[in-house]
Image (tube, rainbow, N blue to C red):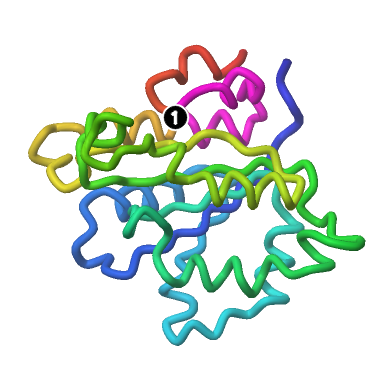
Amino acid sequence: MSEPQQAVLLLLAHPSQHRSEVNLPLFELAKTVPGVTTVDLYGEYPEFDIDIEREQQRLLAHDVVIFQFPLYWYSTPAILKEWQDLVLEYGFAYGTDGNALKGKRFFCAITAGGKEEAYQAEGYNHFTLRQLLAPLEQTASLTGMRYLPPFALFGARTAVEDGLMAQHLEEWRELLTALVAGKLNRRLAAKLERLNGHLDQIITG
């Protein structure tokens, strides 16, 4: 069953955008999708002086929250951790009366330099990408948000040379459009390791 129109908030955290071959095109594409609000955190807060009230109001005004970033040492870039530490306050995002985010959707749009086989129990990184994102999944749980698996591109360092970009960008557009239209089967999507590669199953209508 489709949901009402959803307002989507996309927060980009990429500390070296001049070297970005994947995240920047994804961000630029997202700007063209009606219903998606795009925020470049390093662009808005080059000194890390994050406006907490502004960011909390942004969260309140949206139904879906996306963190977009390249995986840095199995975690988020520094500004996104700072954003979480400051914006997701006790009494706002969790704790007594801290239910501002309850019911919102949340997931990560992420790029990983290594190939997918490196992100397996027997692979170089020993954990799947979803396992490595467990702290963010628990953050979503604590704040009452509904967590979805990541939209992920592996092998990002050579994605352009390997011809992966066209399909990835098209899937990104398809996913964002479906999110805005409320046409994502959340229960089915929640069980997946990642969202992309399964859009024909999880997009309804």
Tell me the magenta residue range: 175-195
Q: Quadrant of the C terminus?
A: top right
Q: Is residue 47 left or right of residue 50?
A: left
**Label 1 element class:** loop
Outermost left residue: 161
15 or 167: which is nearer to us? 15
The answer to whether 177 is drawn above or below residue 64 in the figure is above
Please check the rendered image and state whether residue 185 is part of the magenta-colored stretch, yes or no.
yes
Q: In the picture, residue 137 is in which quadrant?
A: top right
Q: Which residue is mark 1?
A: 194
Q: Is 16 above or below relative to 187?
A: below
The x, y position of residue 17, in whole percent, is 27, 65
x, y percent for residue 83? 56, 70
Q: Quadrant of residue 18?
A: bottom left
- The image shows residue 161, relative to residue 37, as above or below, that is above
Horizontally, is 157 left or right of 45 in the view? left
Farthest residue to the right: give it: 97
Residue found 50% across the figure and 43% down from its top: 33
Q: Decide: few, some or many residues near mark 1? Use Cα within 10 Å; few <14, some 14-19, many ≥20.
A: many
Q: Quadrant of the N terminus?
A: top right
In the picture, measured across the screen, residue 138 lies left or right of residue 39, that is right
User: Residue 55: percent from the left, percent from the top?
Assistant: 66, 69
In the visual, does 187 lie left or right of 68?
right
- Residue type at mark 1? Arg
Which residue is depicted at the point 11% across and 34% down? Answer: 162
Foreground residue among 27 and 132: 132
Coordinates of residue 52 in the picture (x, y in percent) = 67, 76
